[in-house]
């Protein structure tokens, strides 16, 4: 390697120098990955110095592929709580159950971990504008980090399909928002075309190979919070599938440098109406068939043609994991249960992970003595309309009657 990190194509294996901007392999069009020189990192790794730094994404600076530290754009993302959920342990009948609450990030989702690295790269590359297509959280996060960095931000959204909280965030942070007819997959292909034509715009979509480099710190933090241990299973909802791959990669890197001993089984959850990866994994095939018109209440994973689907299949296979799908009813039930028995408020996509593991435990596919961590990807306030809809309505009453109705 000419540098301590490089692009590598996951299909043809060709490497590219990191100073250049690539989204896909220039040789074959395959997905790109950032590969670190783990030997180099391992030789320089100072664990005591690492542990003296605050728990957040940049605690793991030595694993993050940026060159110029003066350009780091941060809102102090990461360092999210890992909650032990005793009531759920009892209800689910499992030994140890934890929730990694990514809703506690600056803009309320794990996307911030990717954007701190991605927007720092945008400054290193010297662009003036960043862009994405989004089901909501990517745009909310990118808009905030672009604001912090002093960059312009362009977001393409599927018209009428973005949850209110997410739209509010992109708007208040000053992004230029373009709503287009059709679903997310359509919005993504449009923003890709724009960025191909306009060299001055940096694309920070799910295709961007630097974002998962920030997201892998979810795996780092979980191991760190468990005293450099790992759970038996790591459960995560899958949309475009960058996150499951990123977390897997995080554990993989830690194992390679000798900080942990095993990689947890990666379990990916999708919604019934958008489950191309679950179908492929369950059939044991490496190629997935895109879903034409994805539908689910969980808008963050309403994705028919996941950009990083093949990476997800790989992460699941290599870790001995599995995949499962859940209905909207199961998602809502899990969302309410987590909120009411543990005090953790999540958006529907995150609840899908809880619903999925519940199903696998009930079916006996997960042993009851396991230690399980579920990644709760986004905050309940992202989709306030849904939360109100699935909860009991307020009791309307005259002021004089209040005592009678409180029960
Ligand atoms: C983006 C997102 C997901 C899906 O993550 P992928 O990397 O696209 O698989 C799940 N939940 C929430 C809340 C998200 O914002
Ligand atoms: Zn290639």
Image (cartoon, rainbow, N blue to C red):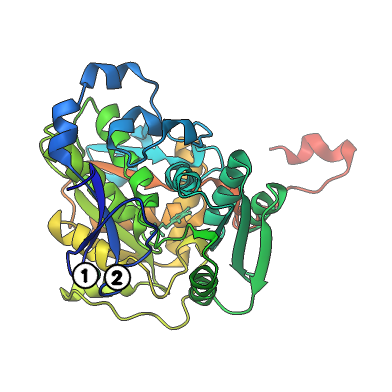
Q: Which residue is mark 2?
A: 277
Q: Secondary structure at mark 2?
A: helix
Q: Quadrant of residue 153?
A: bottom right
On the rendered structure, is 315 left or right of 375?
left
Q: Quadrant of residue 147 in the image?
A: top right
Q: Is residue 327 above or below residue 204?
A: below
Q: Is residue 326 left or right of residue 144?
A: left
Residue 309 placement (x, y as % from top left) = 31, 68
Residue 68 x, y percent position in the rendering: 41, 35
How far across and how far down the image is residue 377, in percent? 44, 48
Q: How many marks?
A: 2
Q: Compare residues 200 and 404 and report the one nearer the observer.
A: 200
Kindly report the distance in space between the C-alpha atoms of the residues bearing marks 2 and 1.
6 Å
Task: Identify whether 395 is placed above or below 205.
Answer: above
* Residue at 42 percent of width and 43 percent of height: 117
Quadrant housing the C terminus: top right
On the image, the x and y values in percent for residue 390 come to 59, 57
Task: Identify the residue under disc 1.
Answer: 281
Between residue 147 and residue 299, name the one nearer to us.
Answer: 147
Ligand 2 in which quarter: bottom left
Q: Which mark is residue 53?
A: none
Q: Answer yes or no: is residue 380 visible.
A: yes
Q: Residue at x 63, y 79 (%)?
A: 181
- The reply to whether discs 2 and 1 touch (Cβ–Cβ < 8 Å) is yes
Residue at horizontal 39 percent and vertical 31 percent from the top: 58
Up-down relation of residue 378 to residue 78 (above or below): below
Label 1 residue SS: helix
């Amino acid at each position: 390697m000419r540098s301590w990190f490089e692009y590598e194509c996951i299909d043809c294996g060709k490497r590219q120098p990191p100073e250049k901007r690539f989204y896909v392999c220039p040789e074959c069009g395959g997905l790109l990955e950032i590969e670190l020189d783990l030997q180099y990192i391992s030789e320089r790794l100072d664990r005591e110095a690492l542990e003296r730094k605050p728990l957040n994404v940049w605690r793991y600076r030595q694993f993050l592929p940026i060159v110029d530290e003066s350009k780091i754009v941060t809102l102090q993302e990461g360092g999210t709580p890992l909650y032990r959920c005793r009531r759920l342990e009892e209800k689910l009948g499992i030994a140890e159950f934890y929730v990694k609450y990514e809703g506690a990030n600056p803009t309320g989702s794990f996307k911030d971990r990717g954007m701190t690295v991605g927007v720092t790269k945008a400054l290193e590359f010297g662009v003036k504008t960043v862009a994405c297509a989004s089901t909501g959280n990517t745009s909310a996060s990118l808009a905030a980090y672009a604001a912090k960095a002093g960059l312009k931000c362009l977001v393409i959204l599927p018209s009428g399909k973005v949850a209110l909280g997410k739209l509010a965030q992109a708007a208040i942070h000053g992004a230029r928002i373009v709503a287009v007819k059709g679903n997310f997959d359509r919005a993504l292909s449009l923003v890709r075309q724009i960025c191909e034509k306009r060299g001055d715009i940096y694309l920070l979509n799910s295709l961007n190979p630097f974002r998962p480099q920030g997201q892998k710190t979810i795996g780092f933090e979980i191991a760190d919070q468990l005293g450099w241990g790992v759970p038996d299973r790591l459960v995560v909802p899958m949309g475009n599938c960058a996150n499951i791959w990123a977390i897997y990669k995080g554990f993989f890197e830690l194992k390679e440098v000798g900080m942990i001993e095993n990689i947890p089984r990666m379990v990916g959850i999708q919604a019934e109406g958008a489950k191309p990866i679950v179908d492929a994994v369950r059939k044991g095939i490496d190629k997935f068939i895109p879903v034409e018109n994805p539908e689910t209440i969980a808008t963050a994973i309403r994705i028919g043609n996941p950009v990083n689907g093949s990476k997800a299949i790989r992460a699941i296979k290599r870790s001995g994991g599995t995949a499962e799908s859940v209905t909207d009813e199961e998602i809502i039930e899990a969302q309410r249960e987590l909120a009411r028995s543990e005090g953790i408020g999540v958006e529907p996509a995150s609840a899908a992970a809880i619903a999925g593991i519940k199903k696998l435990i009930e079916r006996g596919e997960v042993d009851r003595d396991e230690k399980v961590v579920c990644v709760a990807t986004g905050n309940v306030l992202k989709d306030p309309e849904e939360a109100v809809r699935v909860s009991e309505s307020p009791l309307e009453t005259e002021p004089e009657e209040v005592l009678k109705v409180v029960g």
